[in-house]
Image (cartoon, grey):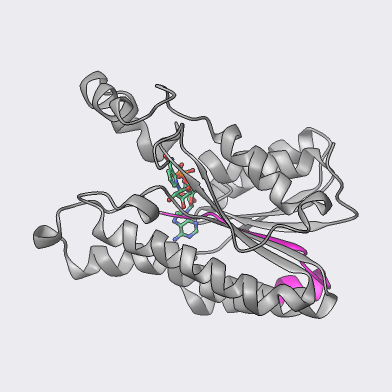
Amino acid sequence: MLTFTHRTALVTGAGRGIGKAIAETLAKQGVTVICVSKSADSCGATAAAIVAAGGKARALAVDVADGAAIAKASEDLLKEFPTIDILVNNAGITRDGLLFRMSETDWNDVIGTNLTSCFHWTKLIGRPMTRARWGRIVNIASVSGIMGNAGQANYSAAKAGMIGLTKTLAREFAGRSVTVNAVAPGFIKTDMTTEFVNNPEVAAKILEAVPLKRFGEAADIANITAYLCSEEAGYITGQVFSVDGGMAM
Ligand code: NAP
């Protein structure tokens, strides 16, 4: 067991995949988890599963691409929870295509959902966190933000942006004992990657670049994220942890 003393976490994109695994892993450690996703059904299902397993959770449907919606949700939450100690910025989308075919809408949607959302949540939830002088922020980036990936100019730019944001905020918040780290997953089996994982030819091509020769599981990302959110990780900040089967070494 890791140490979490009466902590509350907000996890975005907690309805499915990696975010759901992070929410469930934190809840198993006794953390109260606010599960955010776009659809009320998906965050509702995650929160219900946590409560059914004996944990503490509540669901919150928010479109993280909408800064005003985040502001309203944060204002309401901070009336209910005096501080939110842990923030995991995980919600993300892809809209892939080579640059010359990429629309401005696809560029803006990906930057807004993956990167600008982190700016809004961190500004709003981070202020009481820094006042409380304890906090953990984990941004779920991607190997694409480290290595680049043809066909993902929007996504790679957003994820590289999250890494820059992580390092800067680690410096800004360090004096308040709020740590800020990033986890950079490689290919993890979730709805986001189903079309690659389930296509044998594409899967084989991808795995050529993965030294461990398999796709990762959502739990691989959830385990390190939970550690980074724990008391034990208090001397780690501004770091990017690749969890990618060795792809980006
Ligand atoms: P996923 O299975 O597609 O789940 C994405 C989650 O994000 C869903 O819960 C979804 O909400 C939520 N979301 C998307 N847009 C949102 C919005 N505008 N407002 C609120 N919630 C929104 O994705 P995943 O594979 O778990 O990925 C999670 C994170 O890991 C993403 O940031 C992704 O970029 C990153 N990542 C994934 C991989 C991978 O191989 N899977 C690799 C590198 C990085 P709904 O449930 O309501 O739709």
Q: Position of residue 238 (x, y in %)?
A: 60, 63
Report the residue at 73% width, 70% height from top.
77
Left or right: residue 55 versus residue 126 is right
Asked if residue 46 can be seen in this view, the reply is no
Q: Quadrant of the N terminus?
A: top right
Asked if residue 82 can be seen in this view, the reply is yes
Figure quadrant of residue 27? top right
Report the residue at 70% width, 65% height from top.
179
Left or right: residue 57 versus residue 142 is right
Figure quadrant of residue 240? bottom right
Left or right: residue 21 versus residue 245 is right
What span is colored magenta in the figure? 76-92
Figure quadrant of residue 62? bottom right
Looking at this view, name the residue that lies furthest to the front. 249
Report the residue at 21% width, 21% height from top.
201
Looking at this view, name the residue that lies furthest to the right. 5
Q: Quadrant of the C terminus?
A: top left
Q: Position of residue 18 (x, y in %)?
A: 54, 41
- Look at the image and say whether residue 86 sits in the magenta stretch: yes
In the rendered image, the vertical position of residue 9 relative to residue 169, given as above or below: above
Q: Position of residue 93 (x, y in %)?
A: 38, 53
